[in-house]
Image (cartoon, grey):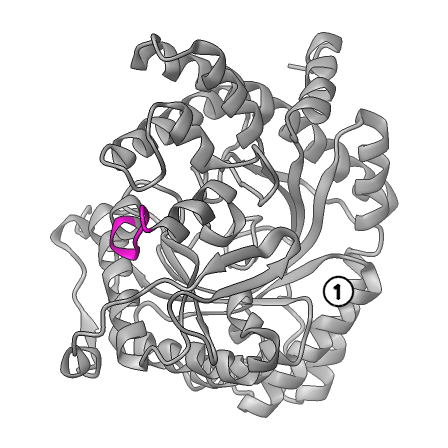
Amino acid sequence: MPLSLTEVLETVQMTEADAFDIRTVTLGISLRGCQSRDPESTRQNVYDRITRTAEHHLAAAQEVERLYGVRIANKRVSITPAALVADGFSPADFVRLAETLDRAAAEVGVDYIAGFSALVEKGMTPGDAALIEALPEALSSTGRVCASVACASTQAGINADAVLAVARAIKGMSARSADRDSIACAKFVAFCNAVGDNPFVAGAFHGPSEPGSALNVGISGPGVVLRAVEALGPGADFGAVTDAIKTMAFKITRAGELVGRRVAERLSQRGERVPFGVVDISLAPTPAERDSVGDILVAMGLGAPGAPGTTAALAMLNEAVKRGGLMAARHVGGLSGAFMPVSEDQAMIDAAASGALTIEKLEAMSAICSVGLDMVAVPGDTSVETIAGVLFDEFAIGMVNDKTTAVRLLPIAGKGVGEWVDYGGLLGKAPIMPVSGVDNGVFARRGGRIPAPIRSLTN
């Protein structure tokens, strides 16, 4: 059903009054057919494929921005997981591939290119292991490349060897970019139950079952939902709050699908056909005032994110967003929920700084929200084994609950609890949060695979 003039005008009003934007239009590109036994030929094939397919991506998105008066905050590209394209490469070859991806992203003018990734939930090939080993240098030496590793799933269990290798890589990223507050860590996510149509970085990649290309949209909208909840006042019951959130989620999802389809149409008019993929209906905050998922929780009646009742409030918010979004879009996908990145949400930043929000409470909330521990800054001297333990815990939550969980942990080199990291822009700032130092070394180093839960046997 086409968008009415009234809906378009409502969207413009939301843009002006409530910081609404389309967070990203992400062009997924399959790199199948780019493989070669020669690393140099593979890199050239990859560069040519990306620059040819995404040549008009930026221009198409900008045209749609002007047409509807809706800001698209980021224009991005995601690719087939690089370990599948370059299996057999050495770590040095993977670093050079990352540099090629960075050049291609700059050439087509996108903000980020994601998919320097490996899918290793059941085991690692030599190429997977080489990509993970290359992560510290690859992410510290490039500006637009984002990476992820899928270490676990409900169907496969948790690959403990991969978890420990990823924990070592995170420490390496921290050290390699120490002069920039370990920013390489902010471009990496480790997953349980990763999805192949996620438009959000750093965890986006173009899944093996996706078509040759697809245009996926990630919406924003915390400010719009916040206004709707605040308008109800403290006397409204949970049913009324749910209805208000559903209504707003419907509107912003409709706007997101409209924008995505128009960008896909313009891309198809200029080159190969690009089908529209999905709308990811996640509420994605920024550090801007009132553009905060945490503020929505406060508007529901909590003193701060982390207060008793936070997990229940987040569950209600997620469910209402999904109900409204599913009615509004033909295809919903990606992560689709509410993001809780500590450094990218002002209310979360304040709660973490005051001590109201702890890593342990964030872990409990991750059983509900789309992404687990996201943009959480911890002391730079946090051990590999402790990082691995945090990964294990998050992946266990995702595996048992059959949901996506992820970890974007930032061990900030040279800094400790009470200090801050400030990246500016969408990445924001965060206090360094304490993490348990109780020894877990024997557990973290056991290796092998934690078996999948019984619920995985669905045949």
Q: Which residue is painted at 41% across and 77% down in the image?
A: 380
**In this rendering, does residue 340 appear at all?**
no
Q: Is residue 110 left or right of residue 372?
A: right
Q: Is residue 259 positioned above or below 370 on the image?
A: above
Can you give x and y, in whole percent of width and height, for residue 144 in the image? 68, 66
Q: Which residue is painted at 80% across and 27% down in the image?
A: 69
Can you give x and y, in whole percent of width and height, for residue 396 in the image? 22, 58
Q: Which residue is painted at 36% across and 62% down in the image?
A: 433
Q: Nearer the viewer, residue 110 or 224?
A: 224
Circle 1 residue: 105
Badge 1 marks a residue whose secondary structure is: helix
Q: Is residue 335 left or right of residue 66?
A: left
Can you give x and y, in whole percent of width and height, for residue 215 in the image? 66, 44
Q: Quadrant of residue 126?
A: bottom left
User: Which residue is farthest left?
Assistant: 454
Q: Is residue 48 left or right of residue 159?
A: right
**Residue range highlighted in magenta:** 355-361
Q: Nearer the viewer, residue 453 or 441?
A: 441
Q: Nearer the viewer, residue 73 or 217?
A: 73
Q: Is residue 150 left or right of residue 35?
A: left
Q: Is residue 243 positioned above or below 94 on the image?
A: above
Q: Residues within 10 Å of mark 1 (few under 14, many from 20)?
A: many
Q: Quadrant of residue 440?
A: bottom left
Q: Amino acid at mark 1?
A: Ala
